[in-house]
Image (spheres, rainbow, N blue to C red):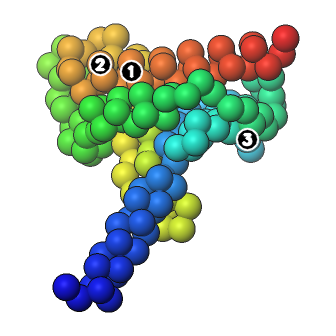
């Protein structure tokens, strides 16, 4: 057996597994109607179940917060992200078509972004939805439902952890 080849495969597997482990989940909500330079809520969740939150100045608990979250949280959110992943442009086209059919109008242009980010390579996958919450309430689409559920899960996690930290 070629020992150099075996060691090379082992090193490659270690590199691949550590590279995958470095992927961070990111959720952002951009409040475009807020006339502040800092109008974006950002939550990052790392594979070691550490969460970083940036809350704009207009929000309660404004500022940057770092905390550990319960074990397995990253795996849960990663699985939800994988299930909710969709083509942003295709989803937006479908939403606009359904809106035209039903004469639905949403004037709340908030952006919800879900991303898988590698620290060295940047975003690997991103899903952006305009007015997610409003459209999910008006249009029956499983993609909107999954993303809306994921967004609510991000908010629930953030709020629970911030309340716990405030105690």
Q: Residues within 10 Å of mark 3 (few under 14, many from 20)?
A: some
The quarter of the picture where residue 160 lies is top right
Residue contact between numbered discs 3 and 2, judged by CB atoms under 8 Å: no
Mark 3 vs 2, N-terminal side:
3
Q: Residue at x 51, y 28 (%)?
A: 73
The quarter of the picture where residue 156 lies is top right
Asked whether, in this view, residue 82 is left or right of residue 42, the answer is left
Q: Classify the position of the N terminus by image quarter.
A: bottom left
Residue 95 lies, in percent from the top left, at 24, 28
Mark 3 vs 1, N-terminal side:
3
Could you say whether the residue bearing mark 2 is in a helix, strand or loop?
helix
Residue contact between numbered discs 3 and 1, judged by CB atoms under 8 Å: no
Q: What's the distance in space between the residues labelled 3 and 2, CA to CA?
A: 28 Å
Q: Is residue 122 above or below residue 25?
A: below
**Residue beneath disc 1:** 148
Q: Residue at x 43, y 34 (%)?
A: 75
Residue contact between numbered discs 2 and 1, judged by CB atoms under 8 Å: yes
Q: Is residue 89 above or below residue 107?
A: below
Q: Nearer the viewer, residue 152 or 99?
A: 152
Asked whether, in this view, residue 54 is left or right of residue 152, the answer is right
Q: Nearer the viewer, residue 15 or 148?
A: 15
Q: What's the distance in space between the residues labelled 2 and 1, CA to CA?
A: 5 Å
Q: Is residue 130 visible?
A: no
Asked whether, in this view, residue 72 is left or right of residue 102, the answer is right
Residue 29 lies, in percent from the top left, at 55, 33
Residue 4 lies, in percent from the top left, at 32, 88
Could you say whether the residue bearing mark 1 is in a helix, strand or loop?
helix
**Residue beneath disc 2:** 145
**Residue beneath disc 3:** 38
Q: Count the marks: how many?
A: 3
Q: Classify the position of the C terminus by image quarter.
A: top right
């Amino acid at each position: 057996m070629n020992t150099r080849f075996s060691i090379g495969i082992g090193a490659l597997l270690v590199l691949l597994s550590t590279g995958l482990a470095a992927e961070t989940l990111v959720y952002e909500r951009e409040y475009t109607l807020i006339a502040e330079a800092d109008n974006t809520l950002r939550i990052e969740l790392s594979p070691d179940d550490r969460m970083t939150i940036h809350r704009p100045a207009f929000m309660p608990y404004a500022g940057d917060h770092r905390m550990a979250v319960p074990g397995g949280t990253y795996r849960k959110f990663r699985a939800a992200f994988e299930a909710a992943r969709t083509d942003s442009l295709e989803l937006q086209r479908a939403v606009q078509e359904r809106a035209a059919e039903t004469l639905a109008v949403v004037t709340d242009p908030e952006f919800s972004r879900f991303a898988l980010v590698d620290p060295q390579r940047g975003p690997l996958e991103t899903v952006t939805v305009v007015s997610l919450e409003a459209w999910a309430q008006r249009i029956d689409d499983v993609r909107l439902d999954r993303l809306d559920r994921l967004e609510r899960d991000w908010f629930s996690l953030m709020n629970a952890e911030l309340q716990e930290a405030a105690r």
